[in-house]
Image (cartoon, helix red, strand yellow):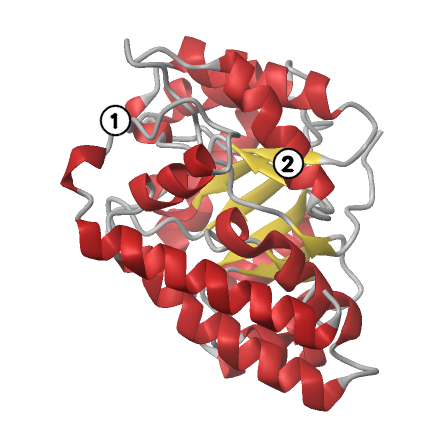
Amino acid sequence: MPITFPGGVYPTMLTPFTENNKVDYNSLGKLIDWYLEQGSDGLFAVCQSSEMFYLSLAERVKIAKFVKEHAGSKCPVVCSGHISYSLDDQAEEIEEIANTGVDAVILVTNRLATASESDDAWIENLSKLMDKIPKDICLGFYECPYPYKRVMTPKTVRFCADSGRFYFLKDTCCDAAMIKERLSITNGSKMKIFNANTATLLQTLQYGAAGYSGVMANFQTREYKWLYKNYKEKAESANEVSSFLTLSSFIEAHLYPAIAKHCLMEKGILATDRCRTCDAAQLTPTNIAEYKQLLFLTNAIDQKFGI
């Protein structure tokens, strides 16, 4: 039975690895608990932050199942892992992920057409894909930047909203006016829009966006949750917190996800900062110092606003 996804904060989950480069399920359990303790309203598993392009299908399926079972009824879990090129392979991975019990399977916009192909080709391929999978699978979309970023157009957003099959959009367009248009298109549909971009988040929450789903929830989940809960009643304070979070988000450019894993390792949540997408050993003393100063300022913001 399709669920209604609550608004709020949906962290794009990391995948912990052991020193032997295996998925570390002990750390993954601790990470899920930490997300929930910090106020997460949902979890986005097996996404780019999870290094999904570097996970086998068996690993993607096992992670999805573990996250859903560990989270239980505490929050909804949406999950991607949609990385294949052929529609038949995509249908297989979608069904395998769906069978883990996650609440929605999130498709990746760039898997359905090349960068040079039209919206019509994209819609045609999506229609074929939907015909290949059970109609009771709740779906969503993610404008994943890798290997190329395909931003949805009004035409493709409308198609998805009108289909009744889509419940979730992780929006990475980074354009408040575009998100406002998308909200108008999806109004009254099942499809909710979660902004991944901090700089436009406050404005789009005011427009009616459902919440935040981005990488910085791996650093500042509580602060994003505070912004989501208080942007209406505490507008002046929300503007200050939003500005701080926007500047904080520049840390993402410093060897992510290794920097996030290192932070969580220092908190005792992850056992290692090992990644498959990059070498955590390349983190510099300056990178670590920047994180520690970010932590200091975050604590100061928390004290100032009672977060």
* Residue 207 position (above or below residue 51): below
Q: Which quadrant is home to the C terminus?
A: bottom right
Q: Residue at position x 50%, y 47% from top?
A: 218
Q: Is residue 205 left or right of residue 62?
A: right
Q: Is residue 125 left or right of residue 222?
A: left
* Residue 61 position (above or below residue 38): above
* Residue 269 position (above or below residue 304): above
Q: Residue at position x 77%, y 46% from top?
A: 5
Position in image of residue 283 (x %, y %): 20, 44
Crowd tier of the residue under label 1, counting other residues whose Cα lies within 10 Å: few below 14, some 14–19, many 20 or above: some
Mark 1 to mark 2: distance in Å?
22 Å
Q: What residue does disc 1 label? A: 276
* Residue 28 position (above or below residue 106): above
Q: Is residue 272 visible?
A: yes
Q: What residue does disc 2 label? A: 34
Q: Amino acid at mark 2?
A: Trp
Q: Residue at position x 24%, y 54% from top?
A: 287
Q: Secondary structure at mark 1?
A: loop
Position in image of residue 128 (x %, y %): 48, 33
Q: Amino acid at mark 1?
A: Arg
Crowd tier of the residue under label 2, counting other residues whose Cα lies within 10 Å: few below 14, some 14–19, many 20 or above: some
Q: Residue at position x 28%, y 9% from top?
A: 20
Position in image of residue 27 (x %, y %): 51, 20
